[in-house]
Amino acid sequence: MPRLALLLTTVIWGATFPATKAALEPIPPLSFLLLRFFLGTLLVLLWFVMCRRRLHHDRALLGASALTTVFLFLGYLLQTVGLNHTSASNSAFLTALYVIFVPMILMRIDRRVVLATAIAVVGLWLLVKPDTSMNLGDVMTLGCAVAFAGHIICLERFTRQVDAPSLLVWQMMAMTVLFLPAPWWEDTTQSDFLPTTVLLIGLGVTGVLATLAFAVQMWAQRLVPAQQVALLFASEPVYAAWLSWYFLGETLDVQGWIGSALILLAVMIGAFGG
């Protein structure tokens, strides 16, 4: 059940790519992230009030929140800034390499993990067709993949030690605070924040649905090993490509469909097999 829940939430993560791409036409990226996490913070706080849950703030929980937030913030920052210096295909491929970094960092390597990871990487290569040359943006995006791997690993540990819903709240609040300087840094104008239909849809997907997906992830990682979570999340570019093909009219050739199939096969082998 938790693996299936994670697989379904990955559809939402995949949907954030075309939704964000469309929303970034009227507003700069980091300012959009500020709105996204601010909306997510409001939603989780509202849920706490409606459910009359107590927001824990002991030292262990705040320490766990600080560490996980560092990884999450670095992941989003390096990915967004790196995208200014590299192609979208390179960004998608390099970001998804957390599928390799998570088992390597944890030293949880067996034949099934190695096989599934290898198939997933080949599938990712066929799907996004990255360039072979490396530049500064690629290096930053590799750093983003390491940061997201660190975040997945932290959630496996801390969601089993502290109150997971409170951990979610403090992370969302911290991300909002960290992105507060974004409008000043990007020289965003008041007109950039006008509630256009595209922006509202983008915030609905990333601020509402993705926050729900994040909550499901934190619940599921209490039960699913981090290396399997990484493999499940490797299907994110598949859903992103499919949804971009369907809603944005982006091209998805035969090679892309084969790559998608390989990634899903890797997920079945690594996360559901054995």
Image (cartoon, grey):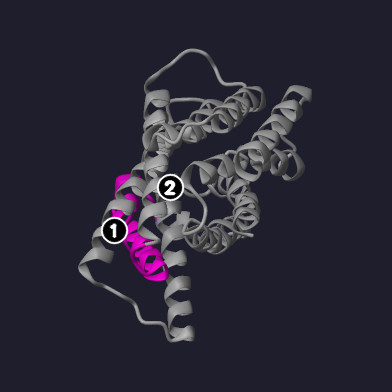
Identified at 48% across, 31% down, the residue is 100
Nearest the camera: 44 or 34?
Answer: 44
Nearest the camera: 125 or 61?
Answer: 61
Residue hosting label 2: 152
Residue 74: percent from left, percent from top: 34, 43
Residue 148 in which image quadrant? top left
Instruction: From the viewer's perspective, tell me whether residue 85 is left or right of residue 265.
Output: left
Q: Which mark is residue 64?
A: 1
Identified at 38% across, 24% down, the residue is 139
* Residue 101 seen by the camera: yes
Instruction: From the viewer's perspective, tell me whether residue 188 is left or right of residue 224.
Output: left
Choose the circle earlier in sequence order: 1 or 2. 1
> Range of the magenta residues?
161-189
- Residue extending farthest top: 133
Q: Quadrant of the N terminus?
A: bottom right
Residue 98: percent from left, percent from top: 47, 35
